[in-house]
Structures are given as C-alpha cells and as structure tokens.
Amino acid sequence: MELVKCYAFKEGKRWSICTYNRSFTTSQTITITLPYEPTTVYTQYLLTSDDVRATNAIDEHVRIIEEQKNGFSRQFTFTLEPSRALVLVNEEQ
C-alpha cells in the first residue's frame, strides 16, 4: 500500500500541493520537485489531531493549522507525521 499521496493543483500562477501520510505509525520524509521556479514565501495548512484515528463526525478533533513560511524552493523536502495531511500553497515567480 502506498503510504504517501501527493496531488498538485494550479490556478494562474498559484500552485497548491496536497500531501497525505496514510501510515498510522511512521513519519514520512517527502521531497517534491516543482515544474516551476517558486517564490520563497508559502502558506502551509496542516491537518492534525492528537489521535491518528480522530474524526470531526461528532466533535472537532482534527484541526487546521495555518502558517506563513519562507524558504520554499524548486526541490523541497519536509517530514510529515503519521496520519497527517499538509497543503502547501505557493506562487510562480
């Protein structure tokens, strides 16, 4: 079974890269190579919870943490904790 999924979406110069770690126990190191020259500024949206099996069906256990960051590059490496989703939003130069 593939433990990491990655999808990219483009609208004008704006790109959104969605990644998912489907493992319940193991962090995954992910390297993406972009088909464009990015600006260094990006927004990161992390979907996270204290329990890897949590849902928001009854109460809100899964949170979205939004952060403005710097340091995005054409080849970008990050580590995604178990059972997490991360969306990186960036623009072409």
Image (cartoon, rainbow, N blue to C red):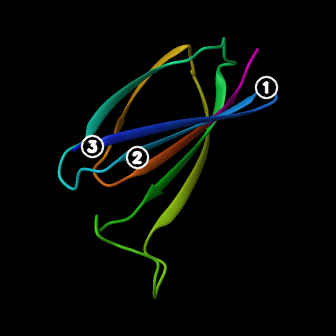
Give residue 36's position: percent from left, percent from top. Answer: 65, 13
The residue positioned 24% from the left and 50% from the top of the image is 23
The amino acid type, in three-letter code, at marker 1 is: Lys
Tell me the tag on residue 20: 2
Q: Main secondary structure of the magenta part?
A: strand
Q: Quadrant of residue 62?
A: bottom left
* Total tally of numbered discs in the picture: 3
The residue positioned 28% from the left and 64% from the top of the image is 52
Give residue 19's position: percent from left, percent from top. Answer: 45, 41
Q: Secondary structure at mark 2?
A: strand
Tell me the tag on residue 13: 1
Q: Is residue 41 left or right of residue 19?
A: right
Residue 43 forms part of the magenta stretch: no
- Residue furthest to the bottom: 58
Residue 92 forms part of the magenta stretch: yes
Q: Residues within 10 Å of mark 3 (few under 14, many from 20)?
A: some
Q: Are marks 2 and 1 in contact (CB under 8 Å)?
A: no
The amino acid type, in three-letter code, at marker 2 is: Tyr
Tell me the tag on residue 3: 3
Q: Residues within 10 Å of mark 1 (few under 14, many from 20)?
A: few
Q: Compute the Cα span from label 3 to label 2.
A: 8 Å
Q: Compute the Cα span from label 2 to label 1.
A: 23 Å
* Mark closest to the chain's N terminus, 3 or 2: 3
Position above or below: 77 against 89: above
Magenta-highlighted residues? 89-93
The amino acid type, in three-letter code, at marker 3 is: Leu
Q: Residues within 10 Å of mark 2 (few under 14, many from 20)?
A: many
